[in-house]
Image: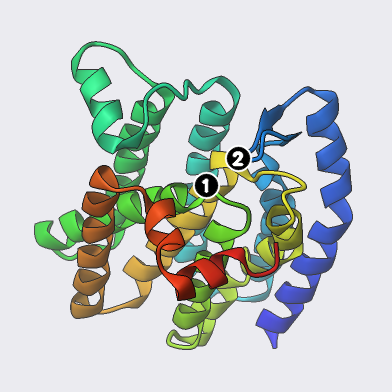
Amino acid sequence: MLSIILFFIGFIGTSLIIPLFKNLLVSSNLVRSNYKGENIPVSMGIVFLPMLILNSILLIYLTDENIIYTYMFLFGIMSMFLAGALDDIIGNRDVSGLKGHFKSLFKGKLTTGGFKALFGGFVGVLISISISKNIIDIIINTLIIALSTNFMNLLDLRPGRAIKVYLLIIFGIFFNVIESIKDIIMLLVPNVLAYFNYDLKAKSMMGDTGSNVLGISIGIIFVISFPLNVRVFWLLFLVFIHILTEKYSLTKIIEGNKFLNYIDKLGR
């Protein structure tokens, strides 16, 4: 029942504030050219936060279950929102991919992408040592959180793509976790659904501000919810995707597959 309440508050509240934040970003000249060359607002992932906080207040007030997990969830999201906002506002697009950012760092040049990767790694370590049983667990959980965060960045290159994959993953998780974890999931999901059509129709970009939030939320839910075998499977998938995208364009792979291309373009 609580999950349903959180859903409606999050969805309705976020729907109401989206136009306000869109106008704020446009008036602040925080716009960027999309893949079609159209200038649209960026960093619209900021709309995920207000109802996230409001519903967190409600959740913590009404229940004492998994309060520490709720605060971990909030800490991770706020941290990566900050790193994503920095990348959206002052990020240099000349360097791409984890490999490129770390090569720049080794040459003594810090990029916003490099900062985001390092910062996200340390955030993952902090969360992992709070819940892990041993050093192996810490390593696995840290990698899951960091790579899940970057996974959404890799997907966020076309309208709606990252959110489609996020929703597929998060609803798959939702039906396989206990009720108290479902409540935590509902702190973010309705906000994303309320915004989804804006992203899908290329009216705005959520930017790294948004994709970071989606990614780390998946990573945190994975490490607090599933046994070792499931977490290892997810980690292997993430490693595979990151290796693949260092060598090949994910967009070209999707465009080369009729089914994936159909799903990718659905609703645009």
Q: Quadrant of the C terminus?
A: bottom right
**Residue corresponding to mark 1:** 157
Name the foreground residue: 238 vs 118: 238
- Residue type at mark 2: give it: Tyr
Name the foreground residue: 36 vs 203: 36
**Residue corresponding to mark 2:** 35
Nearer to us: label 1 or label 2: 2
Q: What element carries label 1?
A: loop
Name the foreground residue: 171 vs 252: 252
* Label 2 neighbour load within 10 Å: few <14, some 14-19, many 20+: few
Give how far across and how far down residue 131 sits, in percent.
29, 62
- Residue type at mark 1: give it: Leu
* Label 1 neighbour load within 10 Å: few <14, some 14-19, many 20+: some
Give how far across and how far down residue 176 sits, in percent.
43, 87
Residue 138 — which label? Answer: none
Q: In this view, does 172 lie above or below 220?
A: below
Callout 1 touching callout 2 (CB < 8 Å) = yes
Q: Is residue 47 above or below residue 15?
A: above
Can residue 141 be seen here?
no
Q: Is residue 119 above or below residue 158?
A: above
> Which one is earlier in the sequence, the residue at label 1 or at label 2?
2
Question: In the image, 157: left or right of 235?
Answer: right
Question: In the image, 22: left or right of 58?
Answer: right
